[in-house]
Image: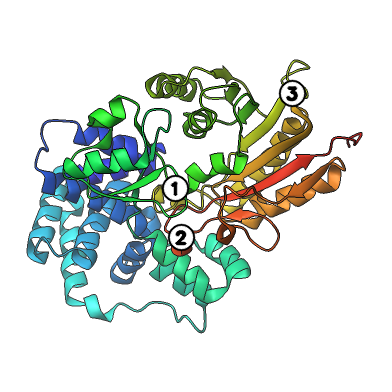
Amino acid sequence: MAVDILNRIEEKGAFAEPLLDACLMRDDIMNISDRRLLTQIVYGTLRMRGRLDWIICQLYRGNFNLMETGIKNILRTALYQIWFTERIPDFAIVDEAVKMAKNMHPAASGLINAILRNAIRKKDEIVYPDIVKNPALHISTFHSHPLWLVKRWLETFGVEETAAICRENNEVPPYTLRINRMKTTQEQVAEEMSHSGFDVKTTTFSPDGLVISHPAVPLREIVFYKSGHIHVQDEASQLIACLVDPTPGDAILDICSGTGGKATHLAEIMGNRGRIVALDINNVKIELLRENAKRQGVDILDAWRGNAAEDRGKGFHEAFDRVLIDAPCSGTGTLRRNPEIKWRSSFADIKKLVLLQRTILKKAALYLKKGGRLIYSTCSMLPAENEEVVKDFIARHNDFVLARPPLTIHSSLIDKQGYFRTFPHRHNMDGFFGAVLMKEADSKGE
């Protein structure tokens, strides 16, 4: 199952979470230990793929790049278990991998057997690039991140912090919920879930968050989720609604809203009073947004399909008190949750995203009332997508200024420049960036 999922991720550009969810919903894997092992193998292999590939290349005499995807993933999953798990003996891992190869790639079964047995014998002899002579290649290889990304983080964070970021990205992220403050409180949900056998604690920074350890059943199957009392959402993502800091009666535009995690949170903070327009280009996400809003009891939210890079027309111009841009980005702050992203992106992709981000920000400025606030946010940890986009915008729009985030954001999450930032290795949440831009009331614009 793990190899099949990994093949589909690599060959078809699929994402791990929905594939795993579909697999775990079937009746042929009911044992909780097996379900956890499958999840661990898939995510663990994705997280450590760079190091696993380095190991294979040290043991394989042929051209690794020409090896079939299925053979690579049989080797990767086996090596991941040999290197990073303790539950299954090495000989059983090799035996299972060879059996799988005979079924899926018969001609390669001997090669897989030889590489894995050689790996067990030489486990302590694998050599990695020297961190002093070549820190970028060492971190990229040993901590399993693409070299282009490591080089850019080194420019921003230095060697020690870049290594810490990459190390943390290979850990299992916390399972974080947001409570629906229109229906319940942190305390009520925490107490009820504790009585039901969940290990629950409140989040450090979000006033609406709970962290669940080792859930025994999928959260989407429990009564609290179905009744709209909780929503699965990382703490950093929850804090974006706090950054917007809406008040009841506001007119808010949420651009690139996705499935509506932030939009529904805004509505809950507003006490379901006011108006929220959520805009996204993806029809499937719009439908999921509507379902989420209904489940959570939100009825002030209108979901629209539309391209954020295009002007929505005069009906939108200066119509909103707050505009939130959840900008399409590289997702480099979410690599703990979405490790497959590491192996798909390139610096060329970042350049294209920056052009799109600048266009969306320029269009979004048209929709904000004078005196209103525009919030630009990403789940990226690359300056090119964050402060550089904001600085370029301010330089071109003399009616906007960078404002300090509201008091709803803890001061430790605001840097010296006045930007909101979270980091996996510092705060144990996804890496997010946010800027609050105020449109001056008496300015004539660009």
Residue type at mark 2: give it. Answer: His
Residue neighbourhood size for the residue with mark 3, other residues' Cα within 10 Å, grouped as few (<14), some (14–19), many (≥20):
some
- Residue 311's mark? 3
Residue drawn at (23%, 31%) of the image: 222
Residue to which mark 1 is pinned: 235
Residue type at mark 1: give it. Answer: Glu
Please give left or right for residue 251 compared with residue 400 in the image: left
Give the spatial CA distance, label 3 vs label 2: 37 Å
Residue type at mark 3: give it. Answer: Asp
Say which of 108 and 81 sits in front: 81
Quadrant position of residue 241 = top right
Give the spatial CA distance, label 1 vs label 2: 10 Å
Front tag of 3 and 2: 2
Nearest to N terminus: mark 1 or mark 3: 1
- Residue 300's mark? none
Residue drawn at (66%, 54%) of the image: 419
Under circle 1, the secondary element is helix
Can residue 309 be seen from the camera position used here?
Answer: no
Label 1 with label 2: CB-CB less than 8 Å: yes
Quarter holding the C terminus is: top right
Residue to which mark 2 is pinned: 427
Residue neighbourhood size for the residue with mark 2, other residues' Cα within 10 Å, grouped as few (<14), some (14–19), many (≥20):
some
Say which of 414 and 146 sits in front: 414
- Outermost residue toward the right in this view: 444
Residue neighbourhood size for the residue with mark 1, other residues' Cα within 10 Å, grouped as few (<14), some (14–19), many (≥20):
many
Under circle 3, the secondary element is loop
Under circle 2, the secondary element is helix
**Where's residue 8, x and y in %?**
33, 39
Query: Against 341, is 84 above or below?
Result: below
Label 3 with label 2: CB-CB less than 8 Å: no
Give the spatial CA distance, label 1 vs label 3: 32 Å
